[in-house]
């Protein structure tokens, strides 16, 4: 029969008091831990994903949208730019690398990104199995996509137009083939199906062509030779296009954006302004845009933390009041314990244990609730944006929070227990 | 065993009572009788070291209570004194068995299950060990109160009106029980009462 057991029994003997105090406490803890985890993980994800590039060049529009769509792959693009215009920048002395990206199609909601192979190097993405894409319509799948869609080397799929899943228009003329699967990198690459630029151009050119050709086919069917099959016709068309890639066709080619890494910090100062003022394109700085986003998020986080702190104080007050009440109600029991030989200090210890149990249970419940929240949001984000969150082990800050709560509870208990020092045993047990 | 000399107590309203000197040898019992309001319970609490500011001297088993620190007093009381109250006091959040265990644990840190079961058996509480104390009948509560005063084998048992709420049959039973238990534990009984039914059972009496 330890004091701890008695304290626990006392605690659960008032289930409604217990419930109220626990709910308040766990609510505040879950709010603080949830919001902190969310903002930390979002911030971490964002900065990790924008780190490889200093500048994005795309069509005019919102710079935030350009960064979100071209670097983080969560928004629709602002439009297309001419590859020829963008290619000029590749030779600029301030530019270390410039990688064109082009997208607009998806497979089951996962983006198919047309780019160059060194895009993957920037994210340190390595192959888990298979090899990189070489020819059009060869695809390297991000680890997460491959896992979720159960894609294996050699699998084929057709893309759908647009960035959201369930698009009605399907490019069923072309089969993409999985050539490689990437190791998990913890970056946006995990959520992508990466192929070369030509694949995107071909899929889209073809779309336009085939519409035109359908026209022509109808009008001029008589002129064409009778045994000219449509399938062959398409094949020829491809050969033709591939042969001219990079030449005259290059000039007409469009990309969605150009991801730039500077050689010198001077580029950061000069190039964005130059591009924005002198070309029809827009330059956006991912670092700057993400910082702006996090500032907006930060004020939200602070508001919620303020609310959580208020709830925490109310929960401290509720623990204080409930302890004060139970100590008054149990005055006789405390006096009885004194006749059993318990010292005043042990009675204080009993009250303290009761308070600390409450705090500990409340904290653990609140922490679990916060992580449950992260899990729910993670599921939602995974479906909606392809970004998942991690369920992290307790962090240092959370131990500080636990410490704060324990200190708060100790103070509340001590204030509530002052009457124990003044306990008149004889008078309490029988009116002497 | 228990000796008092020149014991007196001043109430807050200024009234002062002087108590007769007593001297009990080990195993000897004493009945303190007197009408209500004469200060019997005060006398008992003074001897149990539960009231501060006593004048005079109390010693139990050779230990002078006046000389003990507050902390030593708490421990001494827990180990050597058994109290049976007029109004029953239990820890309501614990069941019957846990209430008994708790009394055994403090301050001797014992967990003598045999003793617990024997006592419960003799007091007719065996079937009720896992009940909540609030679910017990009056008679059962009284017996549990007695068990709590005895379970740790105290040298002296102070009982305050232990028969006040009982009918004749139960009154006789409780007195027998107390005497038997005191016999087994070689304890002294000091009962304060104004119940005439009790008096015929004890030779040694003091009137306040």
Image (cartoon, rainbow, N blue to C red):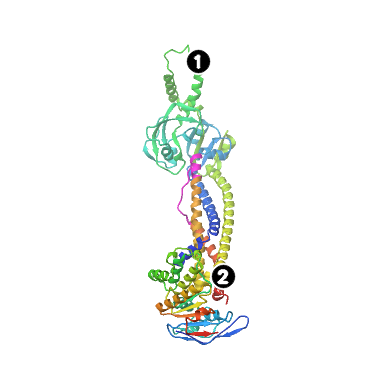
- Whether residue A309 is visible: yes
The x and y percentages for residue B170 are 48, 72
- The secondary element bearing badge 2 is classed as helix
Depicted B195 relative to depicted A367: above or below = below
Depicted A64 relative to depicted A174: above or below = below
The x and y percentages for residue A160 are 48, 30
According to the picture, the residue beneath numbered tag 2 turns out to be A418
Image quadrant holding the N terminus of chain A, namely bottom left
The x and y percentages for residue A162 are 51, 32
Q: Identify the mark at residue A218; answer none if there is no mark.
A: 1
> Most extreme residue toward the top, as rendered?
A222
Q: Is residue B94 magenta?
A: no
**Near-viewer residue (A279 or B82):** B82
Q: CA distance from mark 1 to mark 2?
A: 97 Å
Q: Is residue A392 magenta?
A: yes
The x and y percentages for residue B118 are 39, 70
The magenta stretch is A377-396
């Amino acid at each position: 029969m330890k004091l701890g057991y008695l304290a626990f029994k006392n605690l659960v003997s008032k289930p409604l008091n217990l419930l109220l105090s626990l709910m308040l406490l766990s609510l505040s803890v879950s709010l603080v831990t949830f919001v902190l985890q969310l903002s930390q993980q979002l911030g971490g994800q964002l900065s990790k994903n924008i780190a490889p590039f200093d500048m994005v060049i795309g069509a005019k529009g919102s710079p935030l949208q350009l960064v979100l769509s071209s670097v983080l792959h969560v928004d629709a693009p602002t439009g297309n730019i001419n590859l020829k215009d963008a290619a000029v920048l590749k030779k600029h002395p301030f530019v270390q690398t410039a990688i064109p990206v082009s997208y607009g199609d998806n497979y089951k909601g996962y983006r198919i990104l047309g780019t160059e192979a060194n895009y993957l190097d920037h994210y340190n993405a390595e192959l888990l199995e298979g090899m990189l894409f070489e020819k059009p319509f060869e695809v390297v799948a991000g680890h997460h996509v491959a896992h979720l869609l159960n894609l294996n080397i050699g699998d084929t799929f057709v893309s759908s137009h647009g960035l959201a899943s369930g698009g009605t228009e399907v490019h069923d003329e072309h089969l993409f083939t999985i050539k490689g699967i990437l190791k998990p990198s913890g970056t946006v690459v995990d959520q992508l199906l990466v192929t070369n630029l030509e694949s995107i151009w071909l899929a889209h050119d073809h779309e336009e062509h085939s519409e035109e050709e359908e026209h022509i086919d109808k009008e001029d069917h008589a002129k064409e030779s009778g045994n000219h099959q449509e399938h062959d016709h398409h094949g020829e068309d491809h050969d033709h296009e591939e042969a001219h890639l990079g030449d005259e066709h290059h000039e007409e080619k469009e990309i969605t954006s150009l991801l730039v890494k500077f050689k010198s910090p001077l580029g950061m100062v000069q190039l964005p302004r130059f591009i924005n003022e002198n070309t029809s394109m827009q330059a956006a700085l991912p670092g700057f845009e993400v910082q702006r986003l996090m500032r907006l998020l930060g004020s939200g986080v602070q508001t919620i933390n303020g609310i959580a702190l208020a709830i925490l104080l109310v929960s401290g007050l509720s623990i204080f009041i409930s302890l004060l009440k139970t100590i008054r109600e149990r005055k006789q029991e405390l006096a009885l314990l004194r006749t059993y030989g318990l010292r005043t200090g042990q009675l204080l210890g009993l009250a303290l244990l009761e308070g600390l149990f409450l705090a500990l249970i409340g904290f653990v419940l609140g922490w679990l609730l916060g992580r449950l929240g992260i899990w729910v949001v993670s599921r939602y984000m995974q479906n909606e944006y392809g970004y998942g969150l991690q369920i992290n082990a307790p962090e240092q800050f959370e131990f500080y929070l636990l410490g704060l709560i324990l200190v708060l509870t100790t103070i509340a208990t001590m204030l509530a227990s002052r009457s124990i020092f003044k306990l008149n045993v004889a008078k309490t047990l029988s009116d002497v | 065993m228990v000796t008092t000399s020149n014991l007196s107590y001043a109430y807050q309203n200024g009234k002062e009572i002087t108590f007769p000197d007593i001297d009990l040898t080990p195993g000897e019992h004493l009945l303190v009788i007197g009408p209500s309001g004469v200060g019997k319970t005060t006398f008992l609490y003074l001897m149990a070291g539960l009231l501060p500011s006593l004048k005079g001297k109390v010693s139990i088993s050779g230990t002078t209570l006046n000389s003990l620190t507050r902390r030593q007093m708490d421990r001494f009381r827990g180990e050597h004194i058994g109290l049976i109250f007029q109004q029953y006091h239990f820890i309501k959040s614990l069941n019957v068995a846990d209430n008994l265990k708790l009394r055994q644990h403090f301050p001797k840190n014992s967990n003598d299950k045999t003793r617990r079961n024997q006592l419960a058996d003799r007091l007719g509480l065996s079937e009720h060990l896992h009940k909540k104390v609030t679910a017990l009948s009056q008679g059962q509560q009284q017996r549990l109160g007695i068990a709590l005063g005895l379970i740790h084998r105290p040298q002296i048992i102070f009982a305050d009106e232990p028969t006040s709420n009982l009918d004749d049959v139960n009154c006789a039973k409780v007195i027998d029980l107390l005497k038997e238990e005191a016999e087994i534990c070689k304890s002294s009984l000091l009962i304060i009462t104004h119940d005439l039914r009790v008096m015929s059972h004890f030779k040694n009496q003091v009137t306040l």
